[in-house]
Amino acid sequence: MRPLFSNWRKPTTTALKWAALVIPMAMAVGSACAFFLWSLDAVTHLRFQQPWLLYLLPVAGVVVGLVYHRWGKPAEGGSNLILDEIHRPGGGVPRRMAPLVLFGTLATHLCGGSAGREGTAIQMGGSLAGGFARLLKLAPADVRVLLMAGVAAGFGAVFGTPVAGAVFAIEVLTVGQMHYGALLPCFLAAVTADWTCQAWGIVHTPYSIGFGGAAGIAGVFKIDAAILGKAVVAAAAFGIISALFSRLSHALSGWFKRFVPSAPLRPLLGGVLVIGLTLALGTRDYLGLGVTNPDPKAVSIVSFFTSSDIHPWAWWWKILFTAVTLGSGFKGGEVTPLFFIGAALGNALAGLTGAPTDLFAALGFVAVFAGATKTPLACTLMGIELFGGQHVVYLATACFIAYRCSGRSGIYLSQRAPTADKETTA
């Protein structure tokens, strides 16, 4: 019996070690995400009540730009800095990244910038994890795992999807490859952070799919061949659009840096352009997160699931608003806008093909995200957590095909490419 217990000793010790390291860090990240989500909800409601705040967006951009120019370096690297530190721990993730990105994101959303929230959550998670690593003087290998756990905690807490958060953290580093050695710490971190966030009273937006064609009997999935075929075609479109978003965002970021040398002035110009787009279209539907809107006639992520009205170009306008906002230097993230873009495109394709609107909105929701981040497995799991397991075949089909149709690079410039032989098996 002694060899049997000896074989269990090392994994048990390792598990206890990571529990002791991860749980306090994840509780801190979950609390930070709860404050962030509460604050984000408050500034969004204020913007809806005070429409004139949009005209302060250039001023907010200058303030955010000056703050980052004065105190941000190297925190200005954002999520890409965290990925770089995970690949090769070196200078560390600065502690000031968390408060800076929190301030920048809230200022962006208060005045109507089209941005998300995952970048903020990931950066807060990485910053707090890096602070814990420095406090405990961890070895580089342990720092790497703790940073991955911080990413998982931030992602899982901000979206209420802990399983997807854990897998995202190990899948996002290298395209087509998974880093399973950190899976248990990442899962523990994501679950702990999500629980902590919920314990603070945070409630995430619920989504539901009324379409029941995927449900079988006694756990057997019943697949509609016609709908699955339409989903395959739609998935290719989701992948192409995710590539368009990534390339346009990077191109505009490079354009702003090339033609506006002063970093604080880039978001000023970006803010002016967002105001100009808003006035030209005559709608504010593409400002902010876009999850919900108090105007029942407005387009939002929720409306794409529930409304029979088709908005064929809503996805394009959200791409443009978001690329201008983030490319010019405002803070936030790309993922929630990607949810909007995908749900809008799914809504449009459902109207074009006669497919179930709510199902295709859900497929676009996760598939465009999968193509832009190169994380098809995490996005499939997110779809299951948000929309239910009975739709898993459709969700997986959309995410896997979108990933393959989205090209070799995505929104994260520090995401590594695999070797050619490994890519063929991804």
Image (cartoon, rainbow, N blue to C red):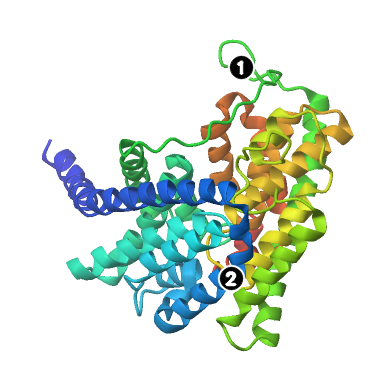
Q: Is residue 418 visible?
A: no
Residue found at x 45% / y 47%: 158
Picture quarter with the N terminus: top left
Give the labeled residue for mark 2: 413
Q: Where residue 338 sits: x, y (%)? A: 65, 51
Residue found at x 73% / y 36%: 297
Q: Where residue 231 sits: x, y (%)? A: 77, 36
Q: Is residue 176 visible?
A: yes
Q: Amino acid at mark 1?
A: Val
Residue found at x 55% / y 81%: 264
Query: Where residue 352 is drawn, which disc sits there?
Result: none
Q: Identify the element where label 2 is drawn.
A: loop
Specify whether 54 is left or right of 181.
right
The quarter of the picture where residue 303 lies is top right
Specify whether 89 is left or right of 354.
left
Between 132 and 40, the residue placed more toward the observer is 40
Q: Amino acid at mark 2?
A: Leu
Q: Where residue 310 sits: x, y (%)? A: 82, 36
Gap in angstroms between the C-alphas marked 1 and 2: 41 Å
Position above or below: 249 against 7: below
Q: Identify the element where label 1 is drawn.
A: loop
Residue extending farthest to the left is 2
Q: Within 10 Å of the Cα at label 2, are there few (<14), some (14-19), or many (20+) other Cα atoms?
A: some
Position above or below: 359 against 286: above
Between 403 and 363, the residue placed more toward the observer is 363
Q: Within 10 Å of the Cα at label 1, are there few (<14), some (14-19), or many (20+) other Cα atoms?
A: few
Q: Where residue 295 sits: x, y (%)? A: 67, 37
Position above or below: 235 against 260: above
Between 283 and 130, the residue placed more toward the observer is 283
Residue found at x 67% / y 76%: 269
Give the labeled residue for mark 1: 220
* Sequence-wise first label, 1 or 2: 1
